[in-house]
Image (cartoon, rainbow, N blue to C red):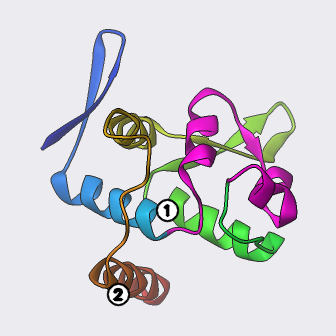
Amino acid sequence: MTSANHLGARSLSYPRRTVERAERSLRVSPFLMPLFVAMRSRSVDIQEIAGIVAQKQQYTQRPLSDLAAENALNWLIQVGVLRREVDGQGITNSFRLTPLGHHIIEQWQNQGNVLPPATWRDRIYNALNRWFRLLF
């Protein structure tokens, strides 16, 4: 088990494979570090993550359609890095980091404030994980 976050007196632990899968998913995502840094302190609405607005805020390298952004965000939810915000009326269109996501982004901020580059192996392994999740 790998320790993953300190929340006051509590600490959460995650299996090493869980942390590795989460890190890989973040590296291959279409999102950049400023988006995840923003998500550490507040929820970010999908309208800020998709389109030209996201590129101008350096959340993405290129504009993403709403559907592409939603799909990428949903994958990060599945691997445990993000969560959707919930208000009194239900699920919203805003996203935040989970404790696992906070831990990973905090580490990367301390190591130069950039997402480590994804390798071809990362991209292939992530694609296979996503594909197999659809099957089962």
- Picture quarter with the C terminus: bottom left
Position of 96 with respect to 124 (left or right) is right
- In the picture, measured across the screen, residue 88 lies left or right of residue 104, that is right
Is 126 placed above or below 99 here? below
Q: Which residue is mark 1?
A: 78
Q: Secondary structure at mark 1?
A: helix
Q: Which residues are magenta?
A: 29-58
Q: Position of residue 97 (x, y in %)?
A: 54, 41
Among all residues in the image, which is located at the extreme left? 1
> Which amino acid type corresponds to the residue marked 1 in the rendered image?
Gln
Q: Residue at x 71, y 68 (%)?
A: 69
In three-dimensional space, the C-alpha distance between marks 1 and 2, rounded to whole angstroms, equals: 18 Å
Could you say which is closer to the camera, residue 112 or residue 11? 112
From this view, report whether residue 10 is shown above or below residue 100.
above
Viewer-nearest of labels 1 and 2? 2
Residue drawn at point x = 52 percent, y = 68 percent: 29
The residue singled out by tag 2 in the image is 124
Verify whether residue 126 appears in magenta.
Answer: no
Which is nearer the N-term, disc 1 or disc 2?
Answer: 1
Location of residue 17 (image quadrant):
bottom left
The picture quadrant where one finds residue 46 is bottom right
Can you give x and y, in whole percent of width and height, for residue 107 in the image? 32, 37
Q: Which mark is residue 68?
A: none
For residue 80, above or below residue 44: below
Principal SS element in the magenta part? helix
Residue 44 drawn in magenta: yes
